[in-house]
């Protein structure tokens, strides 16, 4: 069995952002030279997510609105986690959007359903963050 590991790094200029990382995952899969297997992609930070959904800007705006309703950033003093930090909302948003995705690899390609794309969700950006890609198979 082959095993391939790669870290991707991101530094978003804004506190929150959604980045379509599907091209980087497809590049990693090419480098891994795996035809049949599994591809895990996970955020390595507890204030960022990796998730699969539609690459549609209206939906991404809807995610932002929905997440702000459930875990509003401000006022910062509404959260017990805040004090030395101001990112309690980012931890909650990450929990809602998830840590990782696993995609099947079939005939050397990511075996997506219709419209599925992989996104990095940043909730406390403006600093360097990492995403782990682990690919196993034959
Ligand atoms: Zn924190």
Image (cartoon, helix red, strand yellow):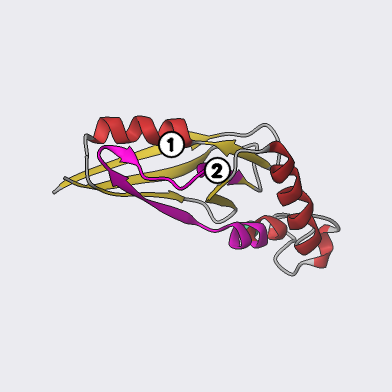
CA neighbours of label 1 inside 10 A, class few (<14), some (14 to 19), many (20+):
some
Residue labelled with disc 2? 120
Residue 70 spot, x, y in % from top left: 76, 63
The quarter of the picture where the C terminus appears is top left
Furthest-front residue in this view: 114
Q: Secondary structure at mark 2?
A: strand
Task: Find out whether residue 113 is within the magenta segment.
Answer: yes
Residue labelled with disc 1? 8
Residue 63 spot, x, y in % from top left: 71, 50
Residue plotted at (38% across, 33% down): 26
Q: Is mark 1 within 8 Å of ligand 1?
A: no
Residue plotted at (44% across, 53% down): 101
Front in this rendered view, residue 114 or 28: 114
Over which residues does the magenta segment extend?
92-121
Q: Is residue 2 left or right of residue 74?
A: left
Q: CA distance from mark 1 to mark 2?
A: 10 Å
Q: State which tag comes first along the sequence, 1 or 2.
A: 1
Residue 7 spot, x, y in % from top left: 38, 39
């Amino acid at each position: 069995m082959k095993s391939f590991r790669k870290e991707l790094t991101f530094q978003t200029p804004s506190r929150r952002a959604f980045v379509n990382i599907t091209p980087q995952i497809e590049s990693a899969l090419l480098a891994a030279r795996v035809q049949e297997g599994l591809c895990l992609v996970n955020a390595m930070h507890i204030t960022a997510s990796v998730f699969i959904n539609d690459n549609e800007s209206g939906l991404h705006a809807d995610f932002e609105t929905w997440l702000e309703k459930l875990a509003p950033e401000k006022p910062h003093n509404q959260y017990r986690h805040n004090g030395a930090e101001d990112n309690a909302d980012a931890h909650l948003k990450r929990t809602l959007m998830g840590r990782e995705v696993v995609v099947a690899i079939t005939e050397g390609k990511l075996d997506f359903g219709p419209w599925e794309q992989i996104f990095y969700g940043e909730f406390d950006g403006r600093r360097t963050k990492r995403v782990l890609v682990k690919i196993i198979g034959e």
